[in-house]
Image (cartoon, rainbow, N blue to C red):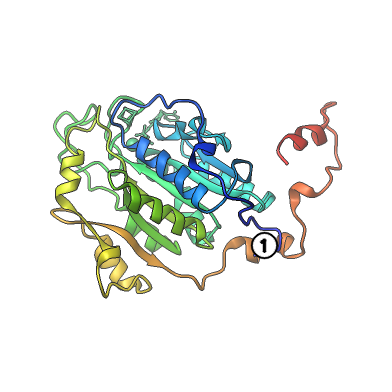
């Protein structure tokens, strides 16, 4: 990585990352994700001004509003392209991308595949509730087959996307699944994803208690087991990762499915960054329509 790449500056507490009170429904899984993320960032010693959280649209996409870090709430499905721009313009920021299953695996699925193969140095925390929460309960790409939803009154006819297998196939170098009902484990996973140099998926089961009455906390608790506690599981072996990643039924694994630490992140290969140039530190040389681009730019340094 560049000399100037983000390294944590000082120890802070999770409270320092807190923003306004979340507007999520009581019991929503996203509370657990926000709490785990702020705990992970503080455990790693980041300060809020070293971090940017980029999100798409959805209940989950509102998360940056509830945190004190920099935030960028972009259009539906487009968080990863914006994060790519930030990563290449200012590698001094720690970038966390958050969003929903609809945002990341529906409208944004093309960006997901390309961000994974590019191996950008970002953590992507998906709050996967198997439903469109914000828009009141339509089927999402991870909805269970036969699930009766607002848009599928006779049940979902399509197979669900498997985010773990998709990420592995796309070349992601860190592929994991968490559960917002298991706080300590989720903190640990997010810490690992942030420490990982490359594209790190944390597909996080985050129940929607209002619109998904099928995939409830109890439903998951009956099925979930932890790969990280399994002696002998080799997260460097992609074949094992695919095998476990395809498991979804009476048993659902959480934990790190796969990690490849030898694949360099895009930021290490980028020719501009390799020359030691940080684009946000370069002077802007143009003025257009009487807009002083330099002063706007200053706000984001
Ligand atoms: C281009 C575009 N298409 C559709 C929408 C409407 N829309 C807003 S959020 C959303 C889906 C939200 O589901 P998900 O991403 O799973 O997030 P959740 O609310 O479940 O956290 C949709 C379809 C939109 N805002 N923009
Ligand atoms: S609608 Fe669902 S996803 Fe949205 S805040 Fe409520 S419980 Fe959470
Ligand atoms: Mg959703």
Q: Is residue 81 left or right of residue 135?
A: right
Say if 242 sits above or below 282 in the image. Answer: below
Q: Is residue 190 above or below residue 38?
A: below
Q: Quadrant of ligand 2?
A: top left
Whether residue 136 sits left or right of residue 194 in the image: it is left
Q: Is residue 89 above or below residue 28?
A: below
Name which quarter of the figure residue 234 lies in.
bottom left
Q: Is residue 95 above or below residue 227?
A: above
Q: How many marks?
A: 1
| Residue under the point 30% across and 24% down | 136
Which residue position holds label 1?
Answer: 270
301 on left or right of 181: right
Q: 215 and 193: which one is in front?
A: 193
Is residue 11 among what the camera can see? yes
- Label 1 sits on a secondary structure element that is loop
Quarter of the figure with the C terminus: top right
Horizontal side of 74 relative to 202 (left or right) equals: right
> In the rendered image, is residue 107 in sight?
no
Q: Nearer the viewer, residue 105 or 260?
A: 260
- Measured as percent of width and height from the top left, residue 267 is found at 63, 60
**Could you tell me which residue is drawn at 22 percent across and 44 percent down?**
158
Quadrant the N terminus occupies: bottom right
- Residue drawn at x 15%, y 35% is 155
Residue 260 % position (x, y): 45, 70
Residue drawn 75% across the image and 51% down it: 279
Q: Is mark 1 within 8 Å of ligand 1?
A: no
Q: Position of residue 23 (x, y in %)?
A: 40, 24
Residue 118 x %, y %: 54, 60
């Amino acid at each position: 990585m560049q000399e100037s790449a983000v390294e944590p500056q000082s120890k802070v507490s999770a409270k320092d990352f807190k923003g306004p009170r979340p507007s999520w429904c009581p019991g929503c899984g996203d509370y657990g994700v926000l709490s785990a993320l702020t705990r992970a960032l503080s455990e790693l010693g980041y300060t809020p001004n070293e971090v940017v959280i980029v999100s798409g649209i959805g209940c989950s996409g509102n998360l940056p509003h509830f945190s004190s870090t920099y935030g960028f709430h972009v259009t539906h499905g487009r968080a990863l392209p914006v994060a790519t721009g930030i990563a290449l313009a200012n590698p001094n920021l720690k970038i966390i991308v958050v969003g929903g299953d609809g945002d990341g695996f529906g409208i944004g699925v093309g960006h997901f595949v390309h961000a994974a193969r590019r191996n950008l140095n970002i953590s992507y925390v998906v709050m996967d509730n198997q439903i469109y929460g914000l828009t009141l309960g339509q089927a999402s790409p991870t909805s269970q087959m036969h699930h009766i939803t607002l848009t599928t009154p006779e049940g979902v006819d399509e197979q669900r996307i498997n985010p773990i297998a998709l990420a592995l196939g796309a070349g992601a170098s860190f592929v994991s699944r968490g559960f917002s009902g298991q706080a300590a484990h989720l903190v640990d996973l997010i810490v690992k994803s942030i420490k990982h140099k490359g594209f790190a998926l944390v597909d996080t089961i985050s129940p929607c208690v209002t619109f998904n009455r099928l995939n409830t906390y109890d439903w998951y608790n009956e099925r979930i087991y932890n790969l990280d506690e399994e002696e002998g599981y080799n997260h460097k072996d992609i074949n094992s990762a695919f095998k476990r990643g395809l498991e979804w039924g009476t048993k659902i694994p959480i934990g790190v499915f796969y990690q490849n630490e030898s694949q360099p992140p895009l930021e290490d290969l980028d020719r501009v960054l390799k020359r030691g140039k940080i684009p946000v530190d370069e002077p802007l040389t143009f003025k257009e329509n009487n807009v002083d681009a330099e002063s706007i730019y200053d706000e984001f340094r």
